Image (spheres, helix red, strand yellow):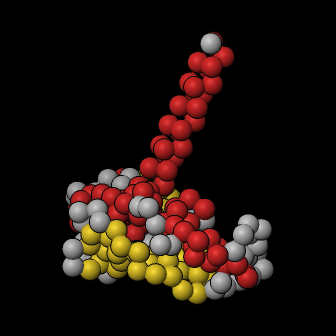
């Protein structure tokens, strides 16, 4: 009985950990997707309502009964590539700036009074200073960088690029919800990512999910997966 109790307890802990890890990944995906939607808007704050709305949509797909939903959420475990910068930038500041010797007295906080950030010196020369700017919250860093670039004696603001994961989730706003496209690349991407497969879902704000279809590479031919043909499995499970 004691052993059975321990097994049940361990199973509960394992399941709880998986649920928490999954929730965290959905949250990170939602932040990145929200950042993509606002990247070209004149706004710094990324709306929490928008983030939660997208997170709900991702969860709705993962929990929907479609075979394709099981594939993207569990079998292939597809998440977003970090395309939009949401946390950091590099500022190239001319030494002629009065605050180049004392960055604690910087004008950034004056033009961005509602943002929490850290600023530290990464490099200094006779002509300029390189500063690392890091936001404590996820923000539309493209907008923030643009605002900082207007400050006097700021030579340049760089947004570090990130290496893309082989897989991705893309989002498009529509009336009443979103179109979510899950992108899967065959191969390991070390030499070549192989070919691409896409799944499309429409998710309404009320949680309704509609599988719109899939296209791209035949995973049965190009995937390194040794399981039965994916399309065969789909045909068997579709009504």
Q: How far across and down, in percent of the image, does residue 152 sit?
A: 31, 76
For the residue pair 168 and 1, the one nearer the viewer reads as 1
Q: Where the N terminus falls, by quadrant? A: top right
For the residue pair 145 and 205, the one nearer the viewer reads as 205
Does the rendering let one see residue 154?
Answer: no
Q: Determine whether 29 is above or below 191 in the image.
A: above
Q: How far across and down, in percent of the image, does residue 65 sit?
A: 44, 61
Does the rendering let one see residue 218?
Answer: yes
Q: Determine whether 77 is above or below 216 in the image.
A: above
Q: How far across and down, in percent of the image, does residue 2 sit?
A: 63, 12
Which residue is depicted at the point 58% across and 36% down?
Answer: 14
The image quarter containing residue 58 is bottom left
Q: Determine whether 66 is above or below 8 in the image.
A: below
Which residue is depicted at the point 47% across and 72% down?
Answer: 239
Residue that protrudes farthest toward the top in the picture: 2
Q: Is residue 37 left or right of residue 183?
A: left
Figure disc tally: 0
For the residue pair 94 and 222, the one nearer the viewer reads as 222
For the residue pair 145 and 71, the one nearer the viewer reads as 71
Q: Determine whether 34 is above or below 152 in the image.
A: above
Which residue is depicted at the point 23% across and 63% down?
Answer: 206
The image quarter containing residue 13 is top right
The image quarter containing residue 76 is bottom right
Q: Is residue 37 left or right of residue 29?
A: left
């Amino acid at each position: 009985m004691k052993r059975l109790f321990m097994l049940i307890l361990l199973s509960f802990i394992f399941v709880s950990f998986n649920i928490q890890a999954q929730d965290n990944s959905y949250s990170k995906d939602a932040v990145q997707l929200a950042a993509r939607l606002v990247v070209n808007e004149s706004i710094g704050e990324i709306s929490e309502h928008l983030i939660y709305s997208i997170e709900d949509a991702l969860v709705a797909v993962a929990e929907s009964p479609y075979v394709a939903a099981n594939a993207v959420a569990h079998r292939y475990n597809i998440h977003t590539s970090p395309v939009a910068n949401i946390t950091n930038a590099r500022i190239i500041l001319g030494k002629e700036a009065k605050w180049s010797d004392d960055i604690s007295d910087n004008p950034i906080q004056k033009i961005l009074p509602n943002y929490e950030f850290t600023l530290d010196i990464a490099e200094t020369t006779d002509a300029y200073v390189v500063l690392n700017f890091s936001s404590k919250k996820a923000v539309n860093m493209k907008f923030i960088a643009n605002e900082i670039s207007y400050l006097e004696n700021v030579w340049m603001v760089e947004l570090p690029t990130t290496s893309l994961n082989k897989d991705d989730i893309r989002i498009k706003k529509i009336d009443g919800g979103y179109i979510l496209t899950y992108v899967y690349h065959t191969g390991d991407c070390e030499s070549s990512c192989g070919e691409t497969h896409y799944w499309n879902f429409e998710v309404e704000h009320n949680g309704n999910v509609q599988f719109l279809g899939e296209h791209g590479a035949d995973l049965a031919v190009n995937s390194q997966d040794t399981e039965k043909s994916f399309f065969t499995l789909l045909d068997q499970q579709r009504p």
